[in-house]
Amino acid sequence: MKVAQIPEFFERLSRDDPAPRTELDFSNDFTLLVAVVLSAQATDIGVNKATKTLFARADTPEKMVALGEATIREEVKTIGLYRNKAKNVFALSQQLIAEHNSAVPNDMETLLSLPGVGRKTANVVMNEAFGVATFAVDTHVFRVSNRTGLAPGKTELAVEKKLDRRIKDPYRRHAHHWLILHGRYVCLARKPKCYNCLVRDLCRFKPKTETA
């Protein structure tokens, strides 16, 4: 893909889905943060199943701390790496209460100081909760960015920085959601659905699958 083709790439995706959102279920900034922390190396569907009961019991840092780490662990035990994730959810809830008046911080560096919060998680929260044009690079975004030629890079950070340089308004706000959804449902890792791709002619990936 040529840099000059990037606006057309996102224009087509935006027409198909004008207002994309995360597929994680949440009710406020805190539950969004917890859901994203839990989603590392797990599917959104799996996280949503686990958090349905958890968030009914604890949708604030105070309620989460009151549950206790053992109860949190029991609630999320169907998710991969659940022991460490439960520990982080409990610890970040404590830190939000102690240092941030129970509010989720709205800046990258402070978010990164919370237990269990890496750059991808912080980017998702900044984008979804606070409307900042950030680029959360998960496996889908990494794959699509490299495969199409949109923002090739050897590391997630390299791809993120290139996306930040190349994507302009009005597409910046929703760009990472479009890329995640495109990678999740069309540009699959093993057998991409090129026959059903809105941006096939702009993509440098060869060979392209012709049929299902």
Image (spheres, rainbow, N blue to C red):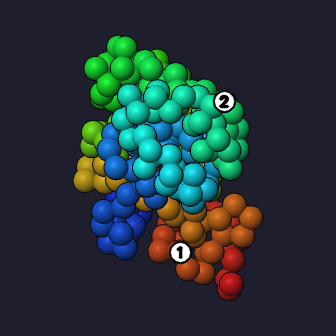
Q: Residue at x 63, y 31 (%)?
A: 70
Q: Residue 66: x percent and y percent?
A: 46, 28
Judge whether residue 163 can be spotted in this image.
no
Mark 2 lies on residue: 84
Is there a contact, CB below 8 Å, between mark 1 and mark 2? no
At 30% from the left edge and 62% from the top edge, which residue is drawn?
19
Instruction: Give neighbour class at mark 2: few <14, some 14-19, many 20+ (Cα, 10 Å).
Output: few
Q: Quadrant of the C terminus?
A: bottom right
Quick one: which residue is furthest to the bottom in this view?
A: 211
| Inter-mark Cα distance, 1 to 2 | 38 Å
Residue displayed at 55% across by 80% down: 196
- Disc 2 is placed on an element classified as helix
Q: Quadrant of residue 25?
A: bottom left
Residue at 38% x, 57% y is 21
The image's mark for residue 60 is: none
Mark 1 burial class by Cα count in 10 Å: few <14, some 14-19, many 20+: some
Q: Nearer the viewer, residue 18 or 164?
A: 18
In-image side of 47 versus 109 (left or right)? right
Location of residue 145 with respect to 19 vertically, above or below = above
Image position, residue 83 (x, y; %): 69, 33
Q: Is residue 198 left or right of residue 156?
A: left
Q: Is residue 186 above or below residue 152?
A: below
Q: Is residue 48 visible?
A: yes
Residue 101, percent from left and from top? 28, 20
Residue situated in front as seen by the camera: 109 or 142? 109
Looking at numbered disc 2 in the image, what kind of residue is underneath it? Asn
Judging by the rendered image, the residue that carries numbered circle 1 is 197
- Secondary element under disc 1, as helix, strand or loop, is loop
Label 1 vs label 2, nearer the camera: 2
Mark 1 or 2 closer to N-term?
Answer: 2
Position of residue 48 measured from the top left corner of the image (x, y, whole percent):
52, 55
Location of residue 192 by image quarter: bottom right
